[in-house]
Image: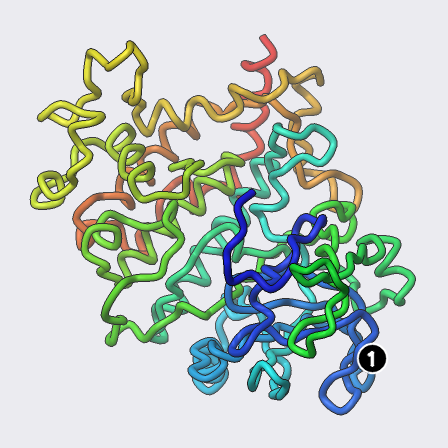
Amino acid sequence: MTRSLRCLFEPSPLDHIEDIENYKSGGFHPLLIGDKVAGGRYRILHKLGSGEFSTVWLARDERGKRLVSLKIMSAETSSTCNELRTVQYLKQTAVHHPACTYILSVLDHFEIEDPNGRHVCLVSEFAGPNISALHFNPDKPGEIRRLRGDLARKYSKQLILVTGYLHSVGIVHGDITTSNVLIQLASADEWTDQDVYQRLGYPVPAEVRLCSGELNDLVSAPKYVVESARLPDLESTWLTEKIVLVDFGQAFMLQTPPCGTAVLTVAYAPPEVIFESKLSVWSDIWALACTIFEIRAGFQLFEIFSGTSREVLRHMVEILGKFPEPWWSSWEERNVYFDDDGKPKKSWPDSICLSEEHSLTETIRDIGENESKPTVPPETCNSNSVSIETKSIFGPPGIKLSETEVENFADLLHKVMRYCPEQRLPIEEILEHPWVEAFDSFSAIDEHMACKSTIK
């Protein structure tokens, strides 16, 4: 692997860690397990994760006698901490609304100063794994774990409700993805430190070394880094039937969308964001639709491997059809994959097919197709009458959606994922759609019939 000439540190042997090179001026705050912050109030127990702009830690609130999540922003991000402003606005405008329970509560905030700068720290409730991470099967690498149908639809409805609530108070989330939808935990405040390590695993450390090979002696970086806790491996007994939406770092007021290049996870970005960097309430609704699909399917609608907008645009045309003008003509790479009508080319260089048409309805109908085939009898495929304490949050593999749900789900997504932003279904109409509104009554029957049909 070719290293950057500016690299300070050797690559870590660990997976699931932050970018060590971000321990620099303007970057991350160095922390170690056992450290105490905020005058000793919060004691660090484990790492929960990291992103481009922050690290997130599990801590014990010694004053409140509870477990909390501690999000420490990079110094550069802290100088214009959009997330803090947004959560403070939400707190000031809070009204009695059921969707408020699906927003991660910020319990406290403070600042830390170190050689890298001044860092804003947000203290929140300790929540469980994100839905994206849950879909990866630790027992069978390469296979996905799909949520039970009834639970996927329940989580989806909660996400629609909380998105609608944010829009009603004038906030666009700006980064709705399955990575930002977490499962709320049951009774986590009762966990002792030993319970934490038994359920999440002990921290796995690795020494931080300079590029010279010597142990790190820079005050800007920690002596060691640790892998993130194994939240996705938590037993279902600790996972509730409620979600919580997190990460308001890209949020903005509905009436004042940001100017310039839009920062949005590309697999969830609508065409107006990719082509024009145009963010709005309608781009939030497109991302919401992508996220709902992924919650139900266990994989992204516009799956990407290269992480480029080129790949996402190709998938959009394959599934939803040709872009309207001027987007179609402005996409210079369209001729690599499609003819002038937006259909995949019929001949390819070296006979290597680069694009295949696959409608949205077909994509939904194929959910479960590449999973292991079910081996359980149809009568046990759905167990909606059993409490969550005694059953898995995951459904049996290989169970396909009933044709009724395929048709309803495709109808919903077609109406929400229209290319023209203003023609997309608004939140209030999404909530009234049969796939959302009627799932409590029909999901058990639909899933039972789908299971019966699949096993046949």
Q: Which residue lies furthest to the front in this view?
A: 212
Q: Position of residue 182 (x, y in %)?
A: 59, 56
Residue 390 seen in the current view: yes
Task: Pick the quarter of the image with the N terminus.
Answer: top right
Residue 449 seen in the current view: no
Left or right of 369? Residue 386 is right
Q: Which residue is painted at 26% across and 71% down in the image?
A: 257
Q: Residue furthest bottom?
A: 39
Residue bearing the label numbered 1: 65
Q: Position of residue 394 (x, y in %)?
A: 66, 36
Q: Which residue is painted at 50% across and 55% down in the image?
A: 4
Q: What residue type is labelled 1?
A: Lys
In the figure, 400 relative to 8: above or below?
above
Left or right of 268? Residue 255 is left
Q: Nearer the viewer, residue 9 or 170?
A: 9
Under circle 1, the secondary element is: loop
Q: Where is residue 362 in the image (x, y as percent from the top left)?
A: 36, 22
